[in-house]
Amino acid sequence: MRHYVGGGFDASGAPFPLVDPTRGHVVGEVPSAPRELVDRAVDAARAALRGPWASWSPADRARLLHRVADGIERRFEEFVAAECADTGKPRELASTVDIPRAVANFRAYADLLAGRAERSWRTATPDGRGALNYTVRKPLGVVAVISPWNLPLLLLTWKVAPALATGNTVVAKPSELTPGTACLLAEVMAEAEVPTGVFNLVHGGGADAAGQWLTEHPGVDAIAFTGESRTGSTIMRAAAGRLAPVSFELGGKNAGLVFADADLEQAVEGTLRSSFTHSGQVCLCTERVYVERSVFDAFAGRLAAGARALSGYGPMVSAAHRDKVRGYLDKAAADGDVLAGGGVPRFSDDRDGGFWVEPTVLAGLPEDHPAVREEIFGPVVHLAPFDTEEEALALANAGPYGLAATVWTGDVSRAHRVAPALDVGTAWVNTWNLRDLRTPFGGVKASGIGREGGDHSLDFFSEPMNVCVKL
Ligand code: NAD
Ligand code: 6OD
């Protein structure tokens, strides 16, 4: 595990242990970037802005992004293995979602570049000769990309790809818990001949470490961050002093709405996927489901049976996160009903040392209960009944977050009425986590600032400038 700064690999800094979440063993160590290395990474990224990279055309950059995508594909199995080792997620998930999506992130922004048109306006002037206005887009400069542990490569590349597409230089800091695929990405960047200093990688923690030093760094022009809402507030304060723009994808407490007119089988299958994919450790996962009263018992019974039957799921990412999830479960078990799970799976092998939590279905908790209000980020979903569409909407829209929601209904009019009325960045109808990378992605309220995806990312990572030429 090494940093990548100014085109060179570097292992400086005090090592911290890497733990296998599946078994709880220490399996390696990662160097924690000293402040001096963070400074060097920012300096390298600044210097690269003035180098040959500045004159690369969009077509050159698009070709580079495709080379990076090719490089990930060539080493696909290594990436899958690293992602599974760090997160404990099943191979099936890493090989069908995380790594293919990282490849798609680079290819999508490479292709989008080709379709970006610069706008121009002919303006009348009193002398009749007119003026030509045209807009050019410039990179923001040095961008810090800070990412979380749940979808490590997917979420890092989701920001690195458009940042490079628009001509910025990047200093990336992955989560200290999951540095493996970022290290491989640095190797791929070197193999793809990304110019020196254009992509840099530093490892380390957040507070009083590489994360904080990057966000406070006067040489960092913009910050693209995915992680907890509280961390977002801290980073925003750090950026405020120098008015650095931020793009934030933050936490969620996503609701599902199941109407009696829904295909119940589809709603149950969809909710099992939306609540328990990656053991609930996806920001888009559904943690609270409101079910029309007439089908509540049928839905709850089937969902609980489905949760009990799940196998092949992974652990929580760390002992600390497992303890946090278990804390919510203990409170919920004391105050409400546990319809499925609630415990720890037993394997009778060394996995019993890992950070496991059973897929859990809860019911009967009041809406202001911490397990219903706060983001758990684990395999836990709470069910509650509703009587009217208005009540369902009010329940879904309550609370501090607004990332995503899912509506299960067989009524087309209801779908179009309810989905846009949800206070979220993304509403799915009769599906979950179906992603088209050209669409806007982000959250409202405490779930984020700004939109990424497609043109939204290309817009965030570049600054429009108007040139007015008197003819
Ligand atoms: P986190 O906020 O603890 O950490 C995220 C990253 O920020 C890590 O790299 C961490 O080292 C760094 N960091 C922490 N404190 C920092 C500080 N003071 N200054 C600078 N950097 C700092 O989040 P996490 O636990 O890694 O991830 C889980 C959270 O991320 C959940 O809340 C989840 O909802 C959210 N998330 C949101 C999205 C989205 O798209 N909206 C996607 C994935 C995860
Ligand atoms: O699909 C995406 O682009 C994306 N940003 C997903 C975020 C998932 C959160 O864990």
Image (cartoon, helix red, strand yellow):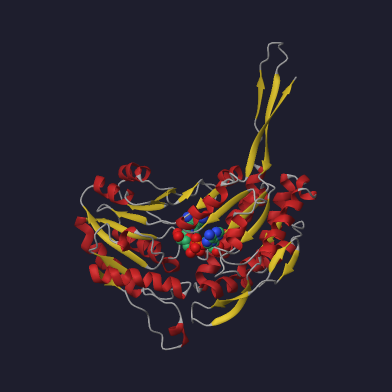
In the picture, which quadrant includes the C terminus? Answer: top right
Q: Residue furthest right?
A: 52
* Spot occupied by residue 388 in the image (x, y as percentages of width and height): 22, 48
Is 280 on the left-hand or right-hand side of 241? Answer: left
In the picture, which quadrant includes the N terminus? Answer: bottom right
User: Does 236 sit above or below residue 19?
Assistant: above
Is 16 on the left-hand or right-hand side of 294? Answer: right
Give the residue displayed 40% in from the left and 73% down from the top: 323
Looking at the rendering, which quadrant does residue 383 occupy?
bottom left
**From this viewpoint, is residue 116 visible?**
no
Q: Which residue occupies the foreground of this view, 350 or 291?
A: 350
Q: Which residue lies furthest to the bottom in this view?
A: 348
* Spot occupied by residue 121 in the image (x, y as percentages of width and height): 65, 25
**From this viewpoint, is residue 285 visible?**
yes
User: Does 134 sit above or below residue 409?
Assistant: above
* Spot occupied by residue 427 in the image (x, y as percentages of width and height): 40, 49
Is 298 on the left-hand or right-hand side of 79? Answer: left
Q: Which residue occupies the foreground of this view, 392 or 246?
A: 246
Total marks in image: 0
* Spot occupied by residue 81 in the image (x, y as percentages of width and height): 59, 74
Give the residue displayed 41% in from the left and 88% down from the top: 348
Q: Which residue occupies the foreground of this view, 112 or 134?
A: 134
Q: Which residue occupies the foreground of this view, 382 or 219?
A: 219
